[in-house]
Amino acid sequence: MHAGTILFFALFIVSASPVSVPSPAFNNEQDLWAQVPIQTAVNFDYIDPRIGGGRFLDFTTPHKGEPLNVIISGKSDPSVLSEDGFTNYARSLGFSNECLGLHFGAIHQADLGDGNGKINEQLLAREYSFGGPVLGTCWESLAGGNHFRAWKQNGTSAPSGAWFLGVSKEENSGKHHEIVPNGYNLGRDFLISQAVSSPTHWNSIWWRTEVELVEGLLNPGKDGVNHGIEQDGLVAVLTVTRI
Ligand SMILES: *[C@@H]1O[C@H](CO)[C@@H](O)[C@H](O)[C@H]1NC(C)=O
């Protein structure tokens, strides 16, 4: 810091302490709030689940979990924050929910720190490469590939509306849905690469997606991670707008 700046602060603190100096710009709180809007929780991108006792690993077993490595921001278009809208958006990225309603793979739980505690996954979607969203997901169920589970952060103590996704790339069903080496990073990166090839579309609805990678939420490494697969700890935050 510049010596002059330090001196300035020193003088300011000294002179500010004995006298209460009113801010010249605001006469009362109403004036201040008019200029500095307070965001309601629903306008948050997401709320760090750890604040409310949750975590960035799901509960695959009581002790191991898979990383929640993608967040669909609560600032996304409201339609994407609904279950139907999100399902459509996911289809525009090449993911579709279960093969003809059949469920392959165990149910995972997650605690998003929103007061709901551990809850079951609300959506499971798989990559479809061939055969479109219905038959294509059957193919993925057998052949392996990218998939995600999703939970919505909408409990009363953290109602951001954001979706938290655990994305990974798995082996074929003969291998009991094990994750491929580096499968958490690979799954996340596949989803991001689909999203940034935007605009994406499904059923003539078009979306544009902004992606940001955030560190410091999910611990990098393999501690507590299901299958002991190392991951880089980066969480992709996607903000989706409808165009
Ligand atoms: C929270 O979101 C889930 C998934 O869309 C939904 O099933 C549930 O009813 C929602 N809860 C509230 C309180 O809105």
Image: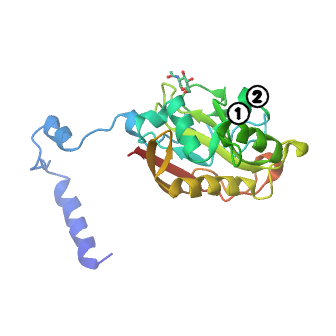
Image x and y of residue 232, in percent = 67, 59
Circle 2 Cα neighbour tier, 10 Å, few/some/many (<14 / 14–19 / ≥20): few
Location of mark 2 (residue): 102
Residue 214 lies left or right of residue 13; in this view the side is right
Q: Which amino acid does the dot numbered 1 rest on? A: Glu
Image x and y of residue 58, in percent = 69, 39
Question: Could you tell me which quadrant the N terminus lies in?
Answer: bottom left
**Cα distance between the residues tagged 1 and 2:** 6 Å
Residue 118 lies left or right of residue 73; in this view the side is right
Image x and y of residue 221, in percent = 72, 57
View extreme (right): residue: 174
Q: Is residue 38 visible?
A: yes
Q: Element under label 1?
A: loop
Q: Nearer the viewer, residue 131 or 183?
A: 131
View extreme (bottom): residue: 3
- Residues marked 1 and 2 touching at CB (< 8 Å): yes
Above or below for 121 versus 126 = above
Ligand 1 in which quarter: top right
Above or below for 12 versus 73 = below
Above or below for 151 versus 22 = above
Q: Nearer the viewer, residue 210 or 206?
A: 206
Q: Is residue 112 visible?
A: no
Residue 18 lies left or right of residue 233; in this view the side is left
Location of mark 1 (residue): 98
Q: Which amino acid does the dot numbered 2 rest on? A: Leu
